[in-house]
Image (tube, rainbow, N blue to C red):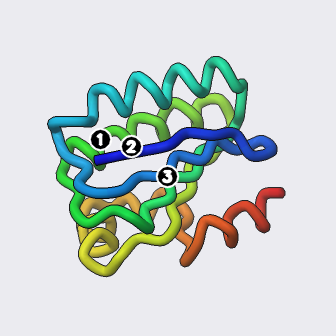
Amino acid sequence: MNYTIKKQGDCLVVALSGEVDVSVTDSLREDVDRALVNFGTGNILFDLSGVEFMDSAGLGVILGRYKKLRGQGGNVYLAGAKPQVKKVLELSGLLRLMEEYPTAGDVLGKIG
């Protein structure tokens, strides 16, 4: 898996690609948490458009950031999930907690 993290406005954009599984989630979690502190943003957008597979460890990273930001008044958004990844998000219940959009641009347009 590869990922990039950048700040756009009041949103931390985490663009993921490849397989999001237990082999990479520790470094992803640490890097996202560090970026939240460094950039001081109140929202995270997980751009999943490049993700082919996600396991429970990947879901855990997203859910953990959701719990952290909701406690501080922020939000987590999901964008671009392919059908196989969207199915995992639905079955896990994450789509009942977080807003999901077709593209990252849709999210950024909404939250400014």
Is residue 65 toward the left or the right of residue 17 in the image? right
Residue picked out by circle 3: 15
- The crowding category of the residue bearing disc 3, from other C-alpha atoms within 10 Å (few below 14, some 14 to 19, many at least 20), is some
Frontmost of labels 3 and 2 is 3
Point 39% across, 35% down: residue: 64
Q: Which mark is residue 26?
A: none
Pointer 2: what residue?
A: 63
Residue at x-position 16% and y-position 38%: 22
Task: Pick whichever, 50 or 111, lies toward us.
Answer: 50
CA gap, disc 3 to disc 1?
16 Å
The residue that disc 1 covers is 60
Q: Secondary structure at mark 1?
A: helix
Which amino acid, by three-letter code, is at mark 2?
Answer: Leu
Residue at position x 61%, y 65% in the image: 104
Residue at 60%, 47% (x, y): give it.
13
Among the two numbered marks 3 and 1 on one chain, the one whose residue lies closer to the N terminus? 3
Name the side, left or right, on which 40 lies relative to 49: right
> Where, by quadrant of the figure, is residue 83 drawn?
bottom left
